[in-house]
Structures are given as structure tokens and as C-alpha cells.
């Protein structure tokens, strides 16, 4: 049995959640193959609490039921009409003092932004979560790129995973540090990383890691972290990244949305 996991997922408040879950489930189940499982690893930014909201019922997806799982760091969403469901694992995204992103998969506590990168990784480990450095457009060049390389040297593949993203356009070469990470034995995970824009929820599940094994019902979050983390079974990337033009248009929309937010027009861009 195989499990397909989108390892870089944001669930913003304005997303249309029910169709997002349906399209993500369909993509990931196809990627996993017959009898396979599917899941989403949340990477929630400071102030975002979608996982908690799903657990306490303040966030709902019409046509889907939510069942909290053992251990408190995962839940199961099932379509009320029947069919395959999705595992959802708690997790955080931290922006460090150096403006490097650190993902904390399987993390139930909020690690503050603004820590030094080494301290952020340390706090993620203290929480029992999996620390991941995700590539993002323009964020692994220059001084930040050297800082990422230093983190890879300090923590090594037995601690630190890397992540590729659907924001890397189709045809864009594999980043140098990801190539180095693969050579050195770092796990390289795949995720959609949807932007905070209206309609981006339809991209969840478009880029994912497929791994042999299945989440254990008694401890799904822990078993998913073992599959994804150091020493886990081989990973295969599934899905397709958008072309450069489509990615550029999305990033322009995102930049405009951030500018509007700074001007007091805090709303998603249609």
C-alpha cells in the first residue's frame, strides 16, 4: 500500500474548503494507486488555526465529516456521500530572523516567527515535529542561500528534510541546494504551497510525495512523520507543476494582494 501526501498545505479562511478537499482527495488517491491512502500536511503561518478550527467544529466543509484521530495531531475528513477520505496532519510554518522559512510537520504548538534559523529548527525538534526547509522563488539565493547551506551542514540529513514546491515552474532546473541535499541523503518532500489568493485552494494536492506504507489508525501523525522523515522508505514525487507563465501570473497576483493588504484593503484577490 502507498500513501500520497501533499506536504506543504495552507488552509486560508477564505478558501472554499469542500471542493478543495474533494479535488485534493481525487488527485492524491490517483497518485497513491489502488487501495492507497491520501493526506495533507498543514504548514500554518503565525495566527492561522485551521487545524484547531476543524477539530472544534468552527471550520466546516459541507458534505464532509471530521473525525479527530488518536494522538491529537491528526484528523480524518470523510465525504458524507462515501468514498475515500483524507488524513490531515497538524503543522506550522515559521519565518526566521533571516527570512528563511522552516516547516514543522506534525507540530501542535505555535513556534514564533523571528527566531534565528538554528533556534527555530531546534524548537521544532523539541516539539517532536519534523523540521523541513522549503524552497521558494528567490529565497535560496545570496546570503539566504548560504544560510540554508549552513543549516544543512549543521543538522544533516538525519534531522533536516528539504522540500520542493509546485511554485517551481515546469522546466525550471532543480535548485542547486536540493541537488546537493539529494546527494547528501536529505529527504526531499513535495508540496503544493497554495498562495493566499481566492481559487488557490484548487491547487492543493497537485504536487505530492508518494511513499510505501499506510498511516496507522492508532497513531496516524506519528506514522506519517516516520514515512516522510529521515530513514523512511523511498519517496516518489507525483503531480505536475504549472508552466513559468502561469506561475509568474500567480506571483504577480500575490504581490498585488500583499500591497493591497499594506494599504488597508485586506482581502483575497479574485
Image (spheres, helix red, strand yellow):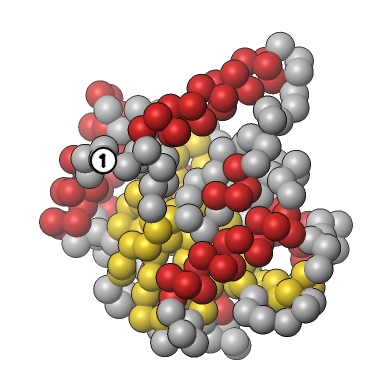
User: In the shown orientation, is residue 59 left or right of residue 91?
Assistant: right
Q: Judge whether 115 appears above or below 23 on screen.
A: above
Q: Is residue 125 visible in this depiction of the protein?
A: no
Relative image position of residue 131 (x, y in whole percent) = 42, 55
Q: Nearer the viewer, residue 224 or 23?
A: 23
Q: Which residue sits at x=19%, y=56%?
A: 182
Q: Nearer the viewer, residue 242 or 176?
A: 242
Q: Is residue 143 visible in this depiction of the protein?
A: yes
* Label total for image: 1
Q: Which residue sits at x=41%, y=42%?
A: 242
Q: Judge whether 21 appears above or below 162 on screen.
A: below
Relative image position of residue 214 (x, y in whole percent) = 47, 84
Q: Which residue sits at x=30%, y=77%?
A: 233
Q: Residue furthest top?
A: 263
Q: Nearer the viewer, residue 171 or 263?
A: 171
Q: Residues within 10 Å of mark 1 (few under 14, many from 20)?
A: few
Q: Which residue sits at x=61%, y=61%?
A: 23
Q: Which residue is mark 1?
A: 171
Question: Disc 1 on helix, strand or loop?
Answer: loop
Relative image position of residue 179 (x, y in whole percent) = 18, 49
Relative image position of residue 84 (x, y in whole percent) = 63, 79
Which quadrant would residue 98 be assigned to in this image? top left
User: In the shown orientation, is residue 260 left or right of residue 184?
Assistant: right
User: In the shown orientation, is residue 185 left or right of residue 227?
Assistant: left
Position of the C terminus by quadrant: top right
Q: Nearer the viewer, residue 175 or 159?
A: 175
Q: Judge whether 155 appears above or below 224 on screen.
A: above
Q: Residue furthest right?
A: 58
Position of the N terminus by quadrant: bottom left
Amino acid at each position: 500500500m502507498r500513501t500520497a501526501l501533499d506536504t506543504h498545505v495552507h488552509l486560508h479562511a477564505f478558501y472554499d474548503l469542500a471542493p478543495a478537499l474533494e479535488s485534493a482527495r481525487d488527485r492524491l488517491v490517483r497518485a497513491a494507486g489502488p487501495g492507497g491512502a491520501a493526506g495533507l500536511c498543514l504548514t500554518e503561518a503565525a495566527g492561522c488555526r485551521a487545524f484547531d478550527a476543524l477539530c472544534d467544529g468552527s471550520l466546516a466543509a459541507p458534505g464532509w465529516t471530521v473525525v479527530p484521530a488518536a494522538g491529537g495531531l491528526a484528523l480524518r475528513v470523510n465525504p458524507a456521500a462515501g468514498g475515500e477520505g483524507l488524513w490531515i496532519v497538524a503543522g506550522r510554518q515559521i519565518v526566521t530572523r533571516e527570512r528563511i522559512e522552516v516547516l514543522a510537520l506534525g507540530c501542535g504548538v505555535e513556534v514564533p516567527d523571528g527566531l534565528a534559523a538554528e533556534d527555530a529548527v531546534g524548537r521544532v525538534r523539541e516539539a517532536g515535529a519534523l523540521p523541513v526547509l522549503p524552497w521558494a522563488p528567490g529565497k535560496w539565493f545570496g546570503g539566504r542561500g548560504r544560510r540554508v547551506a549552513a543549516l544543512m551542514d549543521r543538522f544533516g540529513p538525519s534531522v533536516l528534510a528539504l522540500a520542493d514546491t509546485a511554485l517551481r515552474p515546469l522546466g525550471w532546473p532543480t535548485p542547486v541546494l536540493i541537488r546537493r541535499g539529494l546527494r547528501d541523503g536529505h529527504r526531499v518532500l513535495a508540496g503544493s504551497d497554495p498562495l493566499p489568493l481566492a481559487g488557490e485552494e484548487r491547487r492543493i494536492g497537485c504536487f505530492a510525495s508518494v511513499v510505501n506504507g499506510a498511516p496507522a489508525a492508532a497513531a496516524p501523525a506519528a506514522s506519517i512523520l516516520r514515512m516522510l522523515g529521515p530513514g523512511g522508505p523511498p519517496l516518489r514525487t507525483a503531480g505536475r507543476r504549472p508552466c513559468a507563465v502561469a506561475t509568474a501570473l500567480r506571483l504577480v497576483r500575490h504581490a498585488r494582494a500583499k500591497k493591497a493588504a499594506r494599504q488597508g484593503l485586506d482581502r483575497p484577490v479574485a
